């Protein structure tokens, strides 16, 4: 997926998860900075599971964060407010709610892979982020995944067959393993032109600076 009109495009591999709010923020910050700078981005979404051992029913999000990171209810509320404000400024809507759950995303990544082969990988990633964070849907539910595919004009029956048959399961596992072997332990992580790694949601101004530095570096590389 290429953003903006200028070429040659800057390849960006974004390692991320569908249930990672900072991944949504980081991408939109980068895209905003690129549009402002007139830099074309060639986005390639790479799979990462924050919770590969999550049970099918998922877990309460607040309870999960408390157990995994020691977050208090007050800290969780503060982060949700911060994310909501950041998202609003970037045109992405976070709708956190009491009882919100977090899920495993292995099948969601398979669906993105399936959509990518049909030229819709980026659109699928964005649709799944919206399904989870804006619409409060269970992105581990095959029915939700099929509905999301159909909402993009893709063949729902084909999507269901790919998920049921695990057509893309091995490839997703291999790609996940590759990035872990490269030292990726947290997301978002962005690799620019296959050489420059940037981790975390950096903010629009920092991304603008990074793009400027990369542009200058590529001219002399």
Image (cartoon, rainbow, N blue to C red):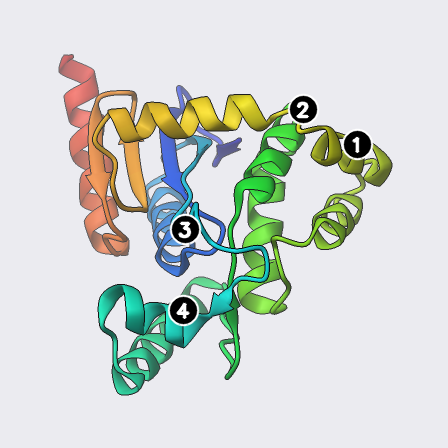
Per the model, the C-alpha gap separating discs 3 and 2 is 21 Å
Going 22% across and 21% down the picture, which residue do you hit?
195
Give the mark nearer the N terminus: 2 vs 1. Answer: 1
Q: Earlier in the sequence, mark 3 or mark 4?
A: 3
Disc 1 to disc 3: CB gap under 8 Å:
no
Pick the quarter of the image with the C terminus. top left
Q: In the rendering, which numbered label is found on residue 167?
A: 2
Marks 1 and 3, the one that precedes in the sequence: 3
Bin the neighbour count of mark 2 within 10 Å (Cα to Cα): few under 14, some 14-19, many 20 and up.
Answer: some
Residue on which the image places disc 1: 161
Residue at image x 53%, y 41%? 106
Judged left or right of residue 200, residue 117 is right
Q: Is residue 185 left or right of residue 123?
A: left
Is 103 positioned to the left or the right of 155 in the image?
Answer: left
Residue 93 appears anywhere in the view: no
In depth, the one of 133 and 119 nearer the eye is 133
Q: Looking at the image, is mark 3 or mark 2 earlier in the sequence? A: 3
Structural crowding at the residue carrying mark 1, measured as other residues with C-alpha within 10 Å and reported as few (<14), some (14–19) or many (≥20): few
Marks 3/4: CA distance? 28 Å
Q: Provide residue 173's location: percent of width, then percent of height.
A: 47, 27
In the image, farthest residue toward the top = 221
Residue denoted by label 4: 89
Is the residue under label 1 in contact with that under label 2 (CB below 8 Å)? yes
Q: Is residue 32 placed above or below 44 in the rendered structure?
A: below
- Of the two numbered discs 3 and 4 in the rendering, the one whose residue sits closer to the viewer: 3
Q: Residue at x 80, y 41 (%)?
A: 153
Say what secondary structure mark 3 lies in.
Answer: loop
């Amino acid at each position: 997926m290429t953003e903006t009109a200028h070429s040659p495009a800057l390849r960006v591999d974004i390692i991320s998860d569908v249930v990672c709010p900072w991944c949504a923020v980081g991408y939109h910050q980068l895209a905003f900075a690129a549009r402002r700078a007139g830099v074309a981005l060639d986005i390639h979404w790479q799979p990462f599971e924050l919770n590969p051992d999550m049970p099918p029913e998922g877990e309460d999000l607040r309870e999960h964060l408390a157990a995994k990171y020691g977050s208090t209810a007050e800290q969780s509320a503060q982060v949700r407010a911060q994310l909501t404000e950041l998202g609003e400024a970037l045109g992405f809507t976070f709708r956190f709610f009491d009882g919100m759950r977090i899920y495993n995303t292995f099948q969601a990544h398979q669906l993105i892979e399936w959509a990518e082969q049909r030229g819709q990988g980026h659109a699928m990633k964005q649709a799944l982020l919206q399904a989870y964070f804006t619409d409060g849907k269970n992105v581990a539910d095959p029915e939700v995944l099929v509905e999301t595919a159909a909402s993009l004009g893709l063949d729902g029956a084909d999507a269901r067959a790919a998920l049921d048959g695990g057509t893309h399961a091995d490839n997703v596992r291999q790609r996940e393993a590759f990035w872990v072997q490269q030292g990726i332990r947290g997301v978002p992580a962005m690799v620019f032109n296959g050489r420059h790694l940037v981790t975390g949601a950096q903010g629009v101004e920092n991304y603008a600076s990074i793009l400027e530095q990369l542009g200058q570096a590529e001219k002399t590389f």
